[in-house]
Structure formats: C-alpha cells, structure tokens
Amino acid sequence: MENNSGIDVKNAISGVLVVDKPVGMTSHDVVQIIRKGSTIKRAGHTGTLDPRASGVLVVLLGPAVRLSEYVSASDKRYQAVIMLGTTTDTYDADGRTTSSAPVNISEEEFNNELQKFVGQIEQVPPPYSAVKVHGQKAYDMARRGEEVELAPRIIHVYSLELLEWAPPEVVIDVYCSSGTYVRSLVNDLGSRLGCGATLSGLRRTKSGRFTLRDAVPLRKLNEAFADGSWYQYLIPAAEALSDWPMIELNDQEVDSIKHGIRIPAVDAKQQKVCGVSGQGELVALLELDAEKMEWQPKKVFFS
C-alpha cells in the first residue's frame, strides 16, 4: 500500500497516531478501527481511557508498538468534572448511587483539601477497574458481587488546579503519573470533604509529549482512511520519545545497529539514547557500555 507520495506506509519504520477518543467507545474499539482502516495489524494504545472518558489516546503502529513500555509510562493530564454530594459503587456516573449528602463547603475549603493530594501518595484503585486479583479482573469480580480488595500503589500527583467552582459541580485539572486513577482521587477527595464525590466527566488533555493539539478526531481519521490520506496524521515514532537524548547515525552505523553490532560511543554523556537515521527515522534504543565506550543496541525497530 502506497500513499500519494509513493511511500510504502505498511512498511513504514514506525509511527504514532494520536486520536481524540470520543465518549462512548472503548480504547480497544479505537485500535480496532485503526487496524482496519490502515490495514496494519500491529497496533496498540499506550494507556486505557474508560468509555465515558474522551481525549488523547496514543496508538502505536507497526514496529513502534515495541515502544509501548516506554510511552505507557509517560505522565498524563486530565480535565475532570466532579459531582459533589454523591458517591457511586464505580466512583463515576455509570455506577449505582451509594450515598447522597448536602454540599456545605466553601471554595477555599475545597481547594485546601484538594491540594493535600499533591505529591507522592498511596492510592487504592477502584473496585471496578481492570486491575487483576488472583488472575481475575477486579471489575468482573465486583460485578459478581464478590469482595474486591486491591493493594494500594504509589502514584505521583504533580499538580491539581481548580478550574471551575459551581457546586455541586466542580472542574479540576489533574497532572499526574501513569497509573493514577482519577476516579479514586475524586472518591478519596469526597471522603475528605465529608460530602462524597463522584467523577461525572473526564477528558485526557495530555499523554507524554502529546496533547490535544496533536490529536485528530476519530471522525476525521475515518474520513482519511476512506480517501487514503490517513498517512498525513502519522507521526514519526522518534517523536514519542522526544524527551530522550538522540544521536544521529550515519548509513554505516545504521547498518551495524540493524545487525545487532555495537558502535563506538564518542563523547557519550547519557546512559540511554535514541538512535535515529539521517532522515529522522527511529532506528534503535541504545545503551552505553561505559567500560568499552560503545553503544549497545537494546531494541531495534527495523531490519
């Protein structure tokens, strides 16, 4: 399959599609649409968004799927809509209401409690989540009425900002580490406030270095699949790791790396780097052997 520029997209070195996921679809649904539309079977997202949530969903295509462990670990940013005075069993508006209470707190009181969640904290995932317990997904156990006990995990909340104060509805900005459950954060905040709270809306505005500015609406992407112009939205895989140091490899070094052969590391100051070709294509992730001053290929992205 060639695009209008004569580029064989199916055999592209690597690529990223950043999608603005609509509400009502699972992240897996979006990946399936991309697999069908691009005819590239190797595809995967780098961080699940619940069906109720919208926003930035990073999908890796072709050999770039091997970047998943690095991209998935990137920080995330969300805009969360909170309904004060209500709790549900799922911690969001899809669940069964478990309590209702009057909301008698001030904006200052809310913000004071909100800021107590900034920093490195322990968080217990929601019972209705994909976290596995003894090989079973927690939400399957919860739906069967089984008791779900999930271990707390350490997360990092870098900042929390109050954007809109219109109780019982409140909107906040959440900047956090990967693995953070905004539903749990909202539920825990509601407990601290004494009135309860549930997540009524969620939009991911940033995932790693990708923001909504990079994201293409799924409707627009589907149109591009239909007319064969979707490649215009394909972002080079190297950009997914733009926070990594990069070194440019000449043709001889590219050939060596492709065959798993180490190359000299001249004046190397970093332990891990991305090796890119002169055309900016991601060739490999390289690790420094400081004793021999050589770059060792750790992951090679084309052969």
Image (cartoon, rainbow, N blue to C red):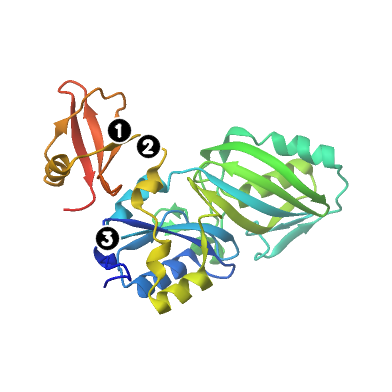
**Kind of residue at badge 3:** Ala
List x then y, in percent, for residue 122: 57, 37
Per the image, label 1 sits on a secondary structure element best described as strand
Give the number of the disc on residue 244: 2
Tag 2 near tag 1, CB within 8 Å: yes
List x then y, in percent, for residue 158: 59, 36
Q: Quadrant of the N terminus?
A: bottom left
Per the image, label 3 sits on a secondary structure element best described as loop
Q: Nearer the viewer, residue 218 or 150?
A: 218
Sequence-wise, the earlier of marks 3 and 2 is: 3
Q: Is residue 12 left or right of residue 187?
A: left
Q: Is residue 159 left or right of residue 241?
A: right
**Kind of residue at badge 2:** Trp
Tell me where residue 256 sits by quadrant: top left
Label 3: few (<14), some or many (≥20) within 10 Å? Answer: some
List x then y, in percent, for residue 260: 13, 42
Q: Which residue is mark 1?
A: 272
Per the image, label 2 sits on a secondary structure element best described as loop
Label 1: few (<14), some or many (≥20) within 10 Å? Answer: some
Q: Residue at x 55, y 56 (%)?
A: 147
